[in-house]
Image (cartoon, rainbow, N blue to C red):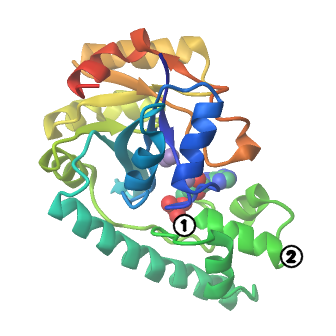
Amino acid sequence: LRIDLHIHSTASDGSLPPAAVVEAARAGGLDVVALADHDTIGGVEAARAAGAGAVHVVPALELSTTHGGAELHMLGYCIDITNPALVSYGARASGARESRMRDMLQRLNDAGVRVVYDDVLAAAGPRPESIGRPHLARALVKRGYANTVSEAFDRLIGDHAPAFVPTRLITPAEAIVLIHDAGGLAVWAHPRYDLLEAELPRMVEWGLDGVECYRPRVMHADAERIAATAARHGLFVTGGSDWHGEWQGRLGDFAIERDDVAEFLERGGI
Ligand code: AMP
Ligand code: MN
Ligand code: MN
Ligand code: MN
């Protein structure tokens, strides 16, 4: 099995619609993928329909949590996408993300950067459930305020840049409860190792199930270190590309194997 458990679509800040993501996954030789859009399950159904028979699509999402004043992402896997609390979280997140985006635009406008909400919407493409900074970054490039998306983040909208406004949607503890109540498994996305060491005991107390470990550009030794720490706390590991679009390479260039995530597959009944 070739597996990728962390992929985005246009339901959030990815560049391909959900069905096209699954088609690209199939073309790239992937057997199991998880669509994990930011704060929305809006793309999962279309992805599952597109996968029928050829690609197994694990229903998932990536929750934007705030922990100690910083952003911390929590993946929810094997969730029931009809769960009412999850559906209403998605609606609330969508609204909160829009008003947070308007706050960021206000800050930019105050600094003389003329970008409006319609520019952001245009950069997001059709049916964006979850407006995010990558859409704003593309709008800033289009309007000539930055040469690249990455420069837009560095200078204007990154976590430590002047126009940044946090999403402040949910805490990690609340995210874990939300995921569990929807029948899912809670996994800490792309943890920084020092934070992982410091915060895992608390996260485990809150019910965390797993830690994301295998990712592109993460050195073998670092992955092994994360895996050992997770095992010490009785957690399973997962892995994925965090793919958002073609500029990150071809979907399927990065894949993990059944043995890497055997415990996750078993817990998730996959
Ligand atoms: P948001 O959820 O709206 O705060 O946007 C966060 C998203 O922005 C992440 O999921 C990434 O896709 C993207 N991102 C964050 N930092 C950077 C960066 N330095 N360069 C490019 N994209 C970034
Ligand atoms: Mn993203
Ligand atoms: Mn993330
Ligand atoms: Mn992600």
Q: Ligand 1 closer than 8 Å to the CB at disc 1?
A: yes
Residue 163, compared with residue 225, is above or below; it is below
Q: Quadrant of the C terminus?
A: top left
- Relative image position of residue 60 (x, y in whole percent): 35, 45
Q: Amino acid at mark 2?
A: Gly
| Mark 2: secondary structure | loop
The residue positioned 59% from the left and 88% from the top of the image is: 106
Q: Is residue 195 visible?
A: yes
In this view, the residue in front, 192 or 130, is 130
Question: Camera-side residue: 126 or 261?
Answer: 126
How many C-alpha atoms fall within 10 Å of the one at disc 2: few (<14), some, or many (≥20)? few
Q: Which mark is residue 132?
A: 1
Q: Where does residue 12 sit, x and y in percent of width and height? A: 51, 61
Q: Which residue is mark 2?
A: 144
Q: Nearer the viewer, residue 231 or 118?
A: 118
Local SS, label 1: loop
- Give above or below for 107 relative to 256: below
What percent of the width, then of the height, locates residue 19? 53, 51
Tell me the crowding category of disc 1: few under 14, some 14 to 19, or many 20 or more residues within 10 angstroms, Cα based. many
Which residue sits at x=40%, y=45%?
48
Residue 189 falls left or right of residue 247: left
Disc 2 and disc 1: Cα gap in Å?
19 Å
* Residue appearing at x 49%, y 61% in the figure: 11
Question: Can residue 156 be seen at all in this image of the molecule?
Answer: no
Name the image quarter holding residue 91.
bottom left
**Position of residue 196 measured from the top left corner of the image (x, y, whole percent):** 38, 31
The image quarter in which residue 109 lies: bottom right
Disc 1 residue type?
A: Gly
Whichever of labels 2 and 1 marks the residue nearer the N terminus, that label is: 1
Q: Is residue 186 left or right of residue 240?
A: left
